[in-house]
Amino acid sequence: MNSTIILIVIAAAIIIFVWYLYNSLIVTRMRVSEAFSQIDVQLKRRADLIPNLVETVKGYAKHEKELFEKVTEERASLVSAKGAAEKATANNQLSETLKSIFAVAENYPELKASQNFMELQDELSDTENKIAYARQFYNSTVLDYNTKLQVFPNVFIGKLLNFKEAEFFGATDEEKKPVKVSF
């Protein structure tokens, strides 16, 4: 009878331990999902600002039709992108295209002085900062989750319960290139 009680206590301790680890993995995985949705929120915010920017610039630069079409296409790609890698790629393509719009604006002093354009530029700049923060927070959360999955004994329980590592929101090769500044 004594050994039966010991076995029941050991089994209960193991069940409670596995239960605790499972719940902590679920909580961490949910934090990863929430952090990714924050990136989505900021990317959506930027995508919503872009049509206003395009319309403002269009009035000044009617002959830049190709550029405006490209911005519209890149925005649509970003909105429809799924997963961290696809969103990162679409985001980077849109960023490159937006640089072209701001380059066009340099040729139109009255556009650069326009209150609407300046406000949109400020909004986009603020949004870019929020996107950068959201990406950092997401990657930090992914690091916590992936680390939790790889430490002992979670590595065994995680595999047994079919937990998968999360994907980092990484910089593309284009983003890693040094920025050229010229005056």
Image: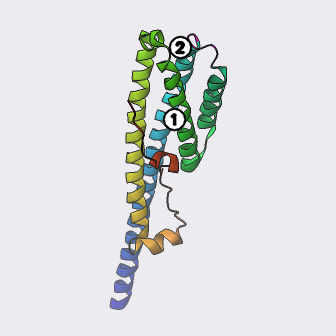
Q: Secondary structure at mark 2?
A: helix
Q: Is residue 83 above or below residue 154?
A: above
Is residue 123 found left or right of 101 in the rendered image?
A: left
Q: Secondary structure at mark 1?
A: helix
**What residue do we see at 47% from left, 54% from top?**
168
Q: Position of residue 27 (x, y in %)?
A: 41, 54
- Which residue occupies the extreme front position in the image? 183
Front residue of this view, candidates 182 and 52: 182
Residues drawn in magenta: 59-63
Q: Position of residue 110 (x, y in %)?
A: 46, 9
**Residue pointed to by mark 2:** 56
Marks 2 and 1, the one that precedes in the sequence? 2
Is residue 170 found left or right of 3 in the rendered image?
A: right
Looking at the rendered structure, the kind of residue marked 2 is Thr
| Magenta span contains residue 138 | no
**Residue pointed to by mark 1:** 95
Q: Is residue 171 above or below residue 48?
A: below
Q: Position of residue 57 (x, y in %)?
A: 54, 16
Q: Quadrant of the N terminus?
A: bottom left
